[in-house]
Image (spheres, rainbow, N blue to C red):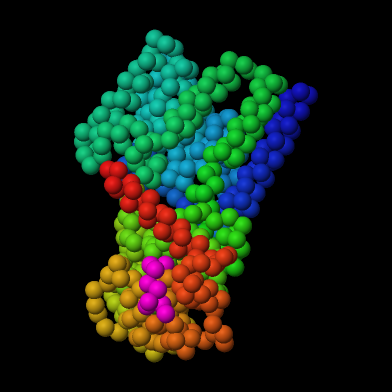
């Protein structure tokens, strides 16, 4: 009877955990799912599978990427993660599952890590042999687990060592160590020692691994030992749940950096063109970084509010409209999207390509690949576009779009009539010249002169001059802005800037005056720091 009660209690708690995890990802962190999905492109091909499983741990990576592709549909991704956490809890323990939820607060952690732990623990649960018979079975299973789970096969080896007789169990760690050395010497010459012996392949930035990636395997083994010593589940299962809930709460409240995930959310909203939500959230809380400024300004421009409200929000400086090139996998994405909508197609292409090449684990980005293909279509480079579309057609969620877009290739009339590609062809530069980020306002000005219906380019031209303090230029081109902007009256932001310029900043409550004052204070601070050095 007690066993039946414990069983129902366990099932009920598992259901509650699953619902809680689903709501956590779907309601509060859907942007985290999108972030993971956009940095891979899972292909439904044999070649893709063989490429992954050709290295130790590659199968766990493949399983993780298989699940992550479904993050494209937010509710489905959240559901799969909920099921994964419940399965992880039953297999490895609820305390390690709570620590895993905490660990995923680091967006560089790959889901393959969880799959590798589950493979190691799962094979141990299936192998009930002991003594010399068990040791002989492990001679075959250890290489298999190592190839499936990579360096986290040490979890399996330690568990089996504890289960087997001490007289022979010590051979397993030695056996795995020899296997790793042989793999490093003959099969993995391109890998470093760290990649062979540490779980670096499950971290997108293979440098310093977070401590939880070490702690979780240790806790998994401790839970295994406790469960093997205490056969009754009357008290240790409720205790596990209580400890797991406490750790889960701590992980969710302190393990998910507020500012970092707010920036991830802004990029997610840009990707999905949810401009109103970007502006609304920025009114409540805005991270004071150039990344955030670019996102908010892009949203304002798409709502035709940039000229009116630009300086109502935090502006980081001259990089608040377009950030300079930064070789990482996130910083340039909002700027790339801005270039794309402005009609600066080549600059968008450069930023998206550089972002894709900055993914340190060598994966292909579905989001970037799609945008690169679109840039090639607009520029008429159909052979290159077809290569990108060929990849996307082998994925699940980009397939239909790729097929539709491929039908446009070399069909000039269809592309020119396309609501996006045709418009960008009319807006883009018609002549080749060298791009200069140091003269960004001139780039916007030339773009507008190329097509005076490009009001976004006009607003960025005027806004960039204000950001850089080009007061004379702003006043000089103000009549042109009034003529072509389409506003019935002069935008409030421009009125404020002109009043501030005329009164040399002595305007109480002026958003632009506050911006200029802050920029001058930061410049003085930088100059004093330079003198100190």
Please determine whether, in this image, residue 286 is positioned above or below residue 257.
below
Using residue 14 as the reference point, say whether residue 33 is left or right of it: left
* Residue 475 seen anywhere in this rendered image of the structure: yes
Q: Quadrant of residue 152?
A: top left
Question: What residue is shown at x 58% (from left), y 51% (from top)?
Answer: 29
Toward the right, the furthest residue is: 1
Please determine whether, in this image, residue 207 is positioned above or below residue 176.
below
Is 449 in the magenta?
A: no
Instruction: Tell me the quadrant of the picture where the C terminus can be found.
Output: top left
Instruction: Tell me the quadrant of the picture where the N terminus can be found.
Output: top right
Q: Magenta residues: mostly which secondary structure?
A: helix
* Residue 89 seen anywhere in this rendered image of the structure: no
Residue 358: horizontal and vertical position, in percent? 33, 54
Residue 63: horizontal and vertical position, in percent? 45, 46
Using residue 112 as the reference point, say whether residue 225 is left or right of it: right
Question: What residue is shown at x 53% (from left), y 73% (from top)?
Answer: 496
Residue 360: horizontal and vertical position, in percent? 33, 49
In front of the other: 466 or 423: 466
Using residue 2 as the reference point, say whether residue 533 is left or right of it: left
Using residue 239 as the reference point, say whether residue 420 is left or right of it: left
Instruction: Specify the segment rendered in magenta.
Output: 467-475
Is 474 in the magenta?
A: yes
Please determine whether, in this image, residue 425 is positioned above or below residue 286.
below
Question: What residue is shown at x 46% (from left), y 17% (from top)?
Answer: 162
């Amino acid at each position: 009877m007690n066993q039946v009660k414990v069983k129902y209690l366990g099932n009920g708690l598992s259901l509650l955990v699953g619902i809680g995890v689903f709501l956590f990802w779907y309601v509060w962190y859907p942007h985290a799912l999108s972030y993971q999905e956009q940095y891979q492109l899972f292909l439904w091909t044999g070649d893709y599978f063989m490429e992954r499983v050709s290295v130790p741990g590659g199968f766990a990576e493949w399983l993780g990427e298989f699940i992550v592709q479904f993050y494209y549909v937010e509710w489905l991704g959240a559901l799969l993660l909920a099921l994964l956490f419940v399965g992880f809890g039953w297999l490895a323990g609820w305390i390690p599952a709570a620590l895993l939820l905490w660990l995923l607060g680091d967006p560089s952690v790959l889901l393959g890590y969880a799959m590798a732990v589950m493979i190691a623990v799962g094979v141990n649960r299936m192998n009930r042999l002991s003594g010399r018979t068990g040791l002989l079975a492990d001679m075959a299973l250890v290489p298999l687990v190592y190839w499936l789970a990579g360096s986290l096969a040490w979890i399996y080896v330690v568990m089996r060592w504890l289960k087997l007789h001490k007289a022979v169990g010590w051979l397993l760690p030695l056996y795995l160590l020899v296997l790793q050395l042989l793999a490093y010497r003959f099969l993995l010459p391109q890998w470093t020692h760290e990649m062979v012996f540490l779980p670096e392949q499950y971290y997108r930035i293979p440098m310093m691994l977070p401590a939880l990636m070490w702690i979780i395997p240790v806790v998994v083994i401790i839970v295994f030992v406790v469960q093997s010593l205490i056969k009754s589940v009357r008290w240790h299962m409720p205790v596990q749940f209580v400890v797991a809930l406490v750790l889960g709460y701590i992980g969710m409240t302190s393990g998910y950096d507020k500012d970092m995930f707010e920036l991830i959310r802004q990029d997610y909203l840009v990707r999905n063109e949810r401009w109103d939500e970007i502006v609304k959230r920025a009114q409540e809380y805005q991270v004071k970084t150039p990344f955030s400024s670019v996102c908010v300004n892009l949203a304002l421009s798409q709502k035709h509010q940039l000229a009116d409200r630009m300086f109502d929000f935090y502006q980081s400086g001259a990089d608040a409209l377009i950030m300079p090139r930064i070789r990482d996998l996130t910083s340039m994405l909002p700027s790339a999207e801005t270039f794309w909508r402005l009609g600066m197609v080549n600059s968008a292409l450069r930023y998206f390509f550089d972002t894709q090449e900055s993914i340190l684990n060598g994966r292909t980005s579905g989001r970037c690949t799609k945008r690169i293909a679109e840039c090639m279509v607009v520029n008429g480079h159909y052979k290159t576009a077809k290569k990108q579309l060929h990849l996307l057609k082998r994925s699940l969620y980009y397939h239909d779009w790729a097929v539709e877009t491929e039908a446009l290739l070399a069909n000039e009339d269809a592309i020119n009539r396309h609501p996006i590609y045709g418009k960008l062809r009319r807006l883009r530069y018609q002549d080749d010249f060298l791009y200069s980020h140091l003269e960004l306002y001139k780039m916007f000005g030339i773009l507008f002169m190329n097509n005076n219906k490009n009001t976004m380019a006009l607003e960025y031209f005027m806004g960039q001059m204000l950001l850089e303090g080009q007061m004379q230029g702003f006043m000089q081109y103000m009549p042109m802005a009034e003529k072509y902007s389409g506003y019935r009256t002069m935008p409030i932001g421009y009125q404020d800037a002109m009043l501030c310029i005329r009164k040399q900043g002595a305007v109480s409550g002026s958003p632009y005056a506050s911006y200029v004052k802050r920029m001058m204070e930061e410049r003085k601070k930088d100059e004093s720091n330079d003198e100190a050095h």
